[in-house]
Amino acid sequence: MVSNPSYNESKAVAAEQTTAIVLRTIEFSETSLIVTLLTRDFGRVSAIAKGARRPKSTFEGSLDLLAVCRVVLIRKSTDALDLLTEAKLHRRFRAAERSLDRVYAGYYIAEMLRLLTDDHDPHPDLYDLAINALAQIDGDGNVALAMLGFDIQALRLLGHSPELRRCTDCGDVVARESRMVFALLGGGVVCHRCRAKQNQTVSMRLESIDHLERLQSANVSLPIEVKPQVYGELRAVISRYIQTIVGTMPRMQRFLPTRLTTGD
C-alpha cells in the first residue's frame, strides 16, 4: 500500500518508455490517480498520473483496469512515486462484454501480478505470459485452462516451480507410485521417510504429478491441454501452493473454475 505519496522533480531521471498492464488505480486527489502498472522493462511500478481524473484527460480510457498501453514514465531515484506523463491505449480489456467468469479471471491475473512481484524487479517473460493469458480470456480461450497455465508458468518464471522428482526434505529420488505426497511448505514431493516431518501435505495422483511436470516446462506456452479428470486436482493443489507462497488466500482465487468444461 502506498503511503504519503510525493515526488521530487529535482531527483527525477529522464523520461522512459515501455509497455504496461494496468493492475490497479487509486484516487489520490480531485484530479489525480495513483496507478500500479506491470511494465515489461521496469517490472511493477507505482506512479502518479496527474490530471487523470479530469474530464477529457489525455489519459482517458488508457488507465482502465487491465488495459495494455504504451507509457512514458519519469522514474525516481528515491522511494517516491514515479511520474506517469503519458499513456497511449493499445488494447482494452473487454471481457465484461463476454461473461462474468472472464472478468473474474482478468481480476485474478491482476491480483496475482501484484502479489507475486516486487517493485522495480523486471520479468519480461512474466509480462509476456500475462499478455498471452489476458488475450486467451478476453478472446475465445478456455478460462480454466488459461488460468491454470498462467499460474504454473508464472511460478516457474519466478523460481517457485515445485520439485516433482526428488524429496524436498532429504533430496533422494522419490519412487513413482499411484499416489504421491506433495508438501506445500516444502514446495514439492516428499518420500515416505520424510512425510511425517511435513506439516502441510496433500496426496496427488501420479497422473496429476506427470501433468504438472509437463506443464511447468519452459517449452510450454498457452493455451495448455489438460485432461478433464486431472484438472480439478491440479487446480486445487496449485491454488493451495500459491496460498502458501504469498501467505494468504488471494481474494479472486475462489472464483476460479473448479471443473474443466468445454464451455469455460
Image: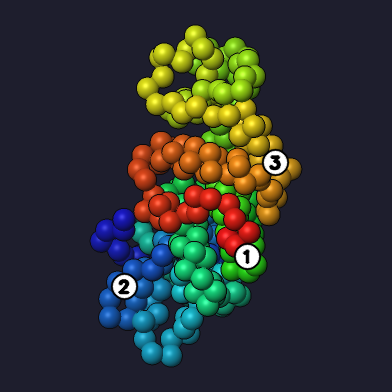
Please state, as top left, top right, bottom left or bottom right, where the N terminus lies in the image. bottom left
Say above or below: 64 vs 169.
below
Q: Earlier in the sequence, mark 2 or mark 1?
A: 2
Placement of 198 over or under 245, stated as above or below: above
Badge 3 is on which residue?
A: 218
Q: What kind of colouring is applied to the model shown?
A: rainbow
> Which residue corresponds to mark 1?
135
Which quadrant of the view contains residue 197?
top left
Q: Rounded to the nearest whole Å, what is the CA distance between mark 1 and mark 3?
A: 20 Å
What's the CA distance linking mark 2 and mark 1? 28 Å
- Residue occupying image coordinates x 36% and y 39%: 247
User: What kind of element bears circle 3?
Assistant: loop
Residue 27: image tag: 2
Q: In the rendered picture of this protein, how many numbered marks are placed on residues?
A: 3
Residue type highlighted by circle 1 = Ala
Q: Nearer the viewer, mark 2 or mark 3?
A: 3
Instruction: Say what secondary structure mark 1 lies in.
Output: helix
Residue type for callout 3:
Ala
Q: Position of residue 183 (x, y in %)?
A: 47, 25
Can the viewer see residue 177? Answer: yes
| 91 on left or right of 61 | right
Q: Quadrant of the C terminus?
A: bottom right
In space, the residues marked 2 and 3 are separated at their CA atoms by: 39 Å
Residue 262 or 145: which is nearer the viewer? 262
Tell me if mark 2 has few (under 14), some (14-19) or many (20+) residues whose alpha carbon lies within 10 angstroms of its own: some
Looking at the rendered image, the disc whose residue lies closer to the viewer, 1 or 3, is: 1
